[in-house]
Image: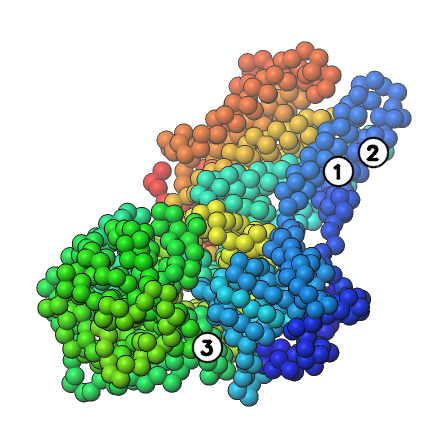
Amino acid sequence: MAEETVVEMPSWHCMTSEDVFKELELSETIIDTGLSDAEVEKRFAKWGYNQLSEKEKETIWQKIWNQIANVLVGILIFVAVVSAIRAATATDGDTITTNWIQVGIIVAVITINTAIGIIQEGAAEEAAEALKAMLASDAIVIRNGKEVKVETKTLVPGDVVKLGTGDRMPADIRLIKVSNFACAEAALTGESVPIDKKVDPIDPKGGDPKTVPLGDRVNMAYSSTLATQGAATGVVISTGDYTEIGTINALVSKVEKQKTNVLKQIDTVSKYLATFIMICAAATFTVAMVYTGEDAVDALSTSLVAAVAMIPEGLEAIVTVVYSYAVGKMAEENAIIRALPAVETLGSVTVICSDKTGTLTQNIMSLVAFVTSDTRYKCDVNSKDRKPENFVRDPTYMSERADHAKYLKANKVISAGPSSGRYADNQSRHAKKGTFEYGMSAHAKFPEPKEGENVTSPEDTHSGESPDSAYLRKALSGGVLCSQCILGEGGSREGEIGNPTELSILRAAYFGGVDVAGMKDSAPVIAEVPFSSEYKFMATIHEPVLENDGPDNMGELVVHAKGAPDRMIPLCKYQAKGGSIAAEDIEPVNTSYWVEQIAILSSHGLRVLALTRGKVPNGSVKEGDQLGPEFVRDRGEPWLTIVGLCAIMDPPRPECVQAITEAHGAGVRVAMITGDHRDTALAIGAQLGLVDEDHSEAVTGPELDAMNEKEMEVAVQKYNVFARASPQNKIQIVKALQSQNEVCGMTGDGVNDAPALKAADMGVAMGKEGTDVAREAAEMVLADDNFATIVKAVEQGRTVWDNLRKVLLVNTPINNAQGLSVFFGLCLGLEESPLTSIQVLYSNLICAVTLGFICAVEPAEEGIMDLPPRRVGKRLIGRYLFLRIAIGTITLTSCVVGSVFWAKHLGYSLEERNSQALNTLNFGAIAVTLSARFAYNASYTKAIFEGNKFTWYAIAVVVVLQVFITYTPGLNETIFSMAPMDGTQWGITCILMAVVFVVMEIEKGVRRNMMAKGVKADDRFEELLDDAKVEPKVEEA
């Protein structure tokens, strides 16, 4: 297995094909002969199956142990064992019955909580299976001199593989021959368009070959990526765990998930409670023996009653309810939670690291602007209506260079931008390769505009107007007809065929109201100059059609040529004024103007494609002629007419801009981590609001690789945009943020995101466009792929934290009062425990599940998203919550013990006093719950009846059950040791319930007055900066 054996792989991408053959011990004729069966067996013995290793899975017994291995459950088990022993050895029928019931209840509680935990976590480790599902099932290889189809898992390093359009790469392959071959690698590298492949070795320019990003290794084809065009032949260099996807599988498997802050604190609280419970049990045992004269067995029984009373058996269940309800609410907002505690983590997220392609952007190459000789049209890429109004004249839209390019030479801006093809020629150490197949040459030199020369559009008096469909049909005809692409059904991606760059023009025309299919049918291609990455353009020849070409172009054959601007502009003698191809609108070309427009668009991270047209005499080209590039470029002088420039990009999701603004308002920083180019990433970052005065630049993956730990920690705080990032870089960024006490969320959709998703405190995957690998590695999946949903999830996460605190405020005083009532009742002279063990278990469960549920589903309090994220490690029980719990415990304990003495003074029997104690306890718990619903504001307003419909349902359940067990014959006496109560006893219960409510409200009133005077008398402020201006809204009582 890869994780057990470290194998140093050669830098295949920097090696010639001869060196590759030599390293793999292959003959020079391997491409023709392939491996022999004997050689395959030999290599199989060394490398094994071409499949991913699986992580060892937990057994059901390990899962059960993980759920019950805590102190409180241990105490419960001890109590159950003691009760079982007493039941087995007792001779009294009531004692036997009571103890077995107690055992049954305890076992049921433990079983239910364990089952809930196992069910919720059961689907958390499926990433490896999702990765395996992405691998190809078979492959075409050459073996024994013949082409044969074999199972992918039988491939070995050295196999010669034949690849074609639609094939999924069966292993990591060094390409030896390519024919217009390209692969879609977005899921692995983050590239938003297919990658043109080459066979020449990559020159690292003196750097470490291993630092060349995966996306820049254009002579490699990686396992699980998809061929989008052309054909290729290559040699397998890595299989199974040794492939790049195998590396990701190992990273996913090695990343260990950590407990959330709440679970850690619940564990801590449990330990403190266990200590406190044992002290109280020991004290109760001593009091029972010394003051009441009980024998050791009875004293132990009494002390165990106190212990059982104070153990929050229902705490885990109600915490699960808090999470589950939040999960349901979030599912309604299209956020699907895969692990319940992840909900709480969202509330403390301080940084969201987001993938660009498909997460912050739409993962659809789109025409965003069409620039003509005198204006520019802005295209609405989000419209679903087919109308020419989707194009609007806007002379200000990207009419000036981006700030970072304002004072640079035009050629420098263009060569550094995403329209440059220099990286496809491997002229740079960190080659961007041909992600943009029409990219301009590294050596292209435009004439720089002279000082004072007009390079701007004239004043547009028609700004805001839209063209008609007839204009768009003619202006965009070069993009529609000079293309072999097929548009998807209804303009969607479903069923589309072809290059995303070309499809973007067809899609824009379609949604501009142009009949794209009819246009192609009316003007079939007579002959063409096929596209090649060598000359960066393609051309098609058509018979003129009136609707496409207008009346002035009907006498000759029409030539449409589109391509890299540096190749097309030198061939242009004319320009179409305003994009009009009418004879009177054809004028001499202003080369300087076009150069500056290319520079402007490139500075904004846009890819630029030039649409040109020309005419040739009828009969000069015959149908089916095989034309070469000389047909277009070797005519002795410029002859084409430039119609316009198509500005193309993968645009931001429109809702993301607002979502990021809201995140910033909530104190959450958003960073973008992508495999795309620095300039493109910066441009998208600027549009999203990620690039600002404090985070004005981007850093690349290779630059991160060269940093030490301290430099990395500085970088992750300095930059919001991380470009050319590898999967390892993403984990490095996440861990560097975590080392500085940042709570890191990571969103993504690709295979390359999976390790970082799992390493992050909160992994968020895309549900529609995302891969199964990413979804299985994440804690949350966005069903609508909407980044804005995360902001809603953050609010719900903060609400969960508040509600957990409210649950503790309800449950803890109730549990404490149960045990302390037994202890203080005996200390103050009661001969019998005021509460029986069955009453205690009943109260524990019923109050936690009903009254605790009220607080578990409370809606968010006003202003929750105006506060900064919680500090890492912030105490769940802060000083003021502790104070409230203490006040609730003292008040409720005093009322329960006091009610028993009151009933005893009035002459009621032991069973009637037991009824008095339990009803005072549970009705007092109702009072605590009503007060706890609002952490800061008064509960004695009309708001008590609003916002949470479950409040009165839960209270009704408690009341009905209390009446039922108090008055049902047999049940009250045999099981609960109770007797019916009269009106006087109910009066005592109501009075003491009111006392509990008033005391809890007085405490809140005091805190409100303190806060009104500027004292931050609340836990949410105890760790904020002194100059924090946020204050909770306090209503007047």
**Image quadrant where residue 735 sits:** bottom right
Task: Give the residue drawn at x 39%, y 58%.
Answer: 485
Q: Secondary structure at mark 2?
A: helix
Marks 3/2 in contact by CB < 8 Å: the verdict is no
Amino acid found under the numbered disc labelled 2: Val
Label 1, on which residue?
Answer: 76
Nearest to the eye among marks 3 and 2: give it. Answer: 3
Picture coordinates of residue 705 (x, y %)?
A: 56, 77
Q: Secondary structure at mark 1?
A: helix
Label 2, on which residue?
Answer: 82
* Residue 424 disc label: 3
Query: The C terminus lies in which quarter of the figure?
Result: top left
- Position of 885 with respect to 493 (left or right) is right
Picture coordinates of residue 827 (x, y %)?
A: 71, 34
Q: Secondary structure at mark 3?
A: helix
Task: Give the residue drawn at x 20%, y 78%.
Answer: 573
* Residue 710 disc label: none
Specify few, some or many for label 3: CA neighbours under 10 Å numbering under 14, 14-19, or 20 or more. many
Marks 3/1 in contact by CB < 8 Å: the verdict is no
Labels 3 and 1: the sequence-earlier one = 1
